[in-house]
Amino acid sequence: MIENLSINNDAGAIGTVDYLQAPSQKINAPQASQIKDLEGATTSVGGYYDHDLKGDFLRVTFTNFNSNSSYTDMNGISHHIGKIVVTYSNLNLIPQQNRNSSQRPVFVVATKSVPGRPWNGVDTLSVLGADQRFDFYDDTGNYIQFIPGTAWMPFGSLTRSWSGIHMDRYDDDHIEMVKAISNAKLYEIPGGNATLHSDGNVYSDPGYRIQEKGAVNSLGNDGGAGIASIQNGATFRLSIQPFNHSEPQGEHNGDTPDWNFFINNTTALEGISLKVPVRKTTSTHYHYNTSVIRL
């Protein structure tokens, strides 16, 4: 496993949001600082949504990456990341009859990285899922071509938890999951507390509820975690199984809202990934540490 893509949590990146389809009501900082998980540490933008949306609906363009944010090709040449465009599409909401009337669907994204927080984060309420696409460009605006197997992106905070009324029924757990759609392949990671399932989704199995296994996985965040080998234009589906999803109408526990938080960073890979190639005058040398990836 070779990791040539480096983006630190404190990359200094600043995101500009474009609404490609108007939400029912926009949310902007500092209003977003009151939303769960964002903790006021990041500037977050998004909106309240009252119906599903087909196609692209939100785009975040990250710029101002520091010198440590780069992709190193197989000749050892470093390409500084000039911008990353993250596009969200195909929004699906939890049906109104399956959520408390106070749980108006929310979709917000982090737009500024700070120490200790991910450079890219998504926080939602009462949202079943949305697609997420990543496009990477260098300082001159050229598309960066990732050699297969040399650029990796982890997905963290894939939480599984019970609602408080059916802790004996795993089928009714809240489960956060991610699935590769195109230009990417997902894997399990050691200590990730999550499994790659036959449907292509990575999520935590029964027995790995956050209440049972604690708040930290091998990437240093709560819930489960997986990793994806990506090429430019990598697209994923972020989705959930909501609390008590099998319950008849009216039996949803309104005191346990379906909050979801998905994060991306690459700093956490340092303990399990190979070092990048080092350019020499006559040849390219590779230095590596062993790692295990479950297929």
Image (cartoon, rainbow, N blue to C red):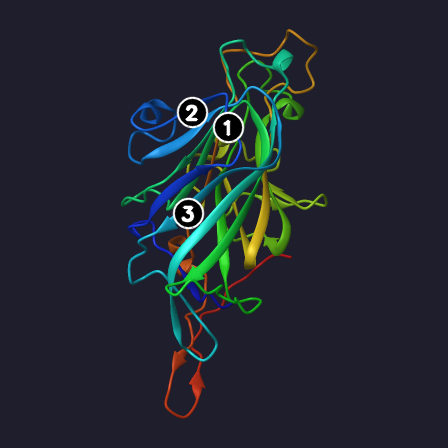
- The answer to whether 252 appears left or right of 7 in the picture is right
N-terminal-most mark, 3 or 1: 1
Q: Nearer the viewer, residue 175 or 280?
A: 280
Q: Mark 3 points at which residue?
A: 61
Marks 1/2: CA–CA distance? 8 Å
Q: Name the residue under label 1.
A: 22
What amino acid is at disc 1? Ala
Q: Do the residues labelled 1 and 2 touch (CB within 8 Å)?
A: yes
Point out residue 239 in the picture as x, y percentages from the top left corner: 59, 34
Q: Name the residue under label 2.
A: 26
- Say what secondary structure mark 2 lies in: strand
Mark 3 residue crowding within 10 angstroms, few (<14) / some (14–19) / many (20+): some
Could you say which quadrant of the image residue 208 lies in?
A: top right
* Above-or-below relation of 122 to 36: below
* Above-or-below relation of 253 to 122: above
Q: Which residue is drawn at 57% across and 59% down?
A: 293
Q: Residue at x 59, y 49 (%)?
A: 235
N-terminal-most mark, 3 or 2: 2
